Amino acid sequence: MRPEFSRQVHFYPGYPLMTHFADLQASAPRRPRNLAQGLVEDVSDRIRGGHILPGEKLPTESELMRQFGVSRTVVREALSRLQAAGLVETHHGIGTYALKPSDSADFRVDPADLATVRDVLVLLELRICLESEAAGLAAQRRTDVQLAQMRQALDEFCHSLATEGDTITPDFRFHLLIAQATDNRYFADLMSHLGSAIIPRTRINSARIADEDRQQYLARVNREHEDIYDALARQAPDDARAAMRTHLSNSRERLRRARAR
C-alpha cells in the first residue's frame, strides 16, 4: 500500500543521522560492522524509535552518501535491506518513504551475527526446514497473481545478472513471495523478520567459495530458482519441496566443502 506521504526527514549539517545514537553507541561496545549495516541500523533505530514517522521521506541517495561518507553502492545495499525488513518503501522517481514498523515480535537475524561461514551454515539449516515445506504448501495454494509476482522477481534477477546490478533484492523477494503463497502468515512473518541477511552472499563471497566467478555462480542460482518456479507453476508440491531443498542444500554443501579445505 502506498504510504501517506508527509514531510521529508532532514539531516542538517553538523547533525548527521548517526549522531542521535552517539550516547548509546558509546555506552555499549559494538561488533565491527560493514558500512551498509551501519546505515541500516541507524535508520531502522530512528524508524522504530518514532524519530522518523510513517510516510516521511528519507533523504536522497546523494544526501545519504554525503552524510555517511559512503558510496552509492553502500547506500543502495542499505536501502534494499531496509525494504526487505519492511521499514521503507521506494517509489522510483519519487523517493523512499518510511513505513510503520511491524508490531510482531522482533525475531530478526542481525547481519552482524553472520560474519562467519559457520554462522551462515547454521541459518541455512533453518532455511532448509522452513522453506522446503513452504514451497510444498505454496505449490498447492499459490494464486495466479502470486505466481506472476514470482515470475517478475526472477525476471528482475535475470536483468540484474546481465547488467551486474543488485540481485539480492529480487532473490529475497522471490523467497518471501513463496512464503506468502503458503497462505499461512507465520511463514511470511518469519521470513520478513529474518530479512535479506539470509541470502549468503550478503555476508560472504559465495562465488569465491564455490570457485566460480560471480556470473557463473549467479547463473547457477538462477537455474535453481527456475526449477523451483517450474514446480510451483505446475502445482507439484513434492517437486517444489525437492527443488527448494536442492537449492538450499547446494549452498550448504559448498560452504561445508570450503570449511574443510
Image: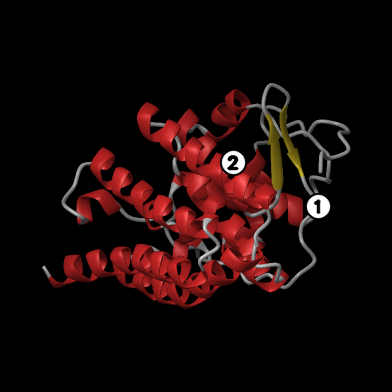
Quarter-of-image position of residue 203: bottom left
Label number found at residue 100: 1
Where does label 2 land, which residue?
A: 79
Q: Nearer the viewer, residue 222 or 168?
A: 222
Depth order, front residue of 154/193: 154
Q: Residues within 10 Å of mark 2 (few under 14, many from 20)?
A: many
- How much space separates mark 1 and mark 2, taking CA atoms? 16 Å
Q: Residue at x 48, y 49 (%)?
A: 171
Quadrant (top left, top right, bottom left, bottom right) of the C terminus? bottom left
Q: Amino acid at mark 2?
A: Leu
Q: Position of residue 234 (x, y in %)?
A: 52, 58
Secondary structure beneath dot 1 equals loop
Left or right placement of residue 128 versus residue 84 in this view: left
**Residue nearest the observer in this picture, 75 or 28:** 75
Measuring from the top left, give residue 122's x and y in whole percent: 39, 75
Where residue 82 appears, x then y in whole percent?
A: 62, 48
Residue 259, numbered circle? none
**In screen coordinates, is 161 left or right of 255?**
right
Identify the residue at image location x=70%, y=71%: 184
User: Residue at point 21% right, 56% down?
Assistant: 209
Residue positioned 88% across, 33% down in the render: 6
**Which element is circle 2 on?**
helix
**Amino acid beneath label 1:** Lys
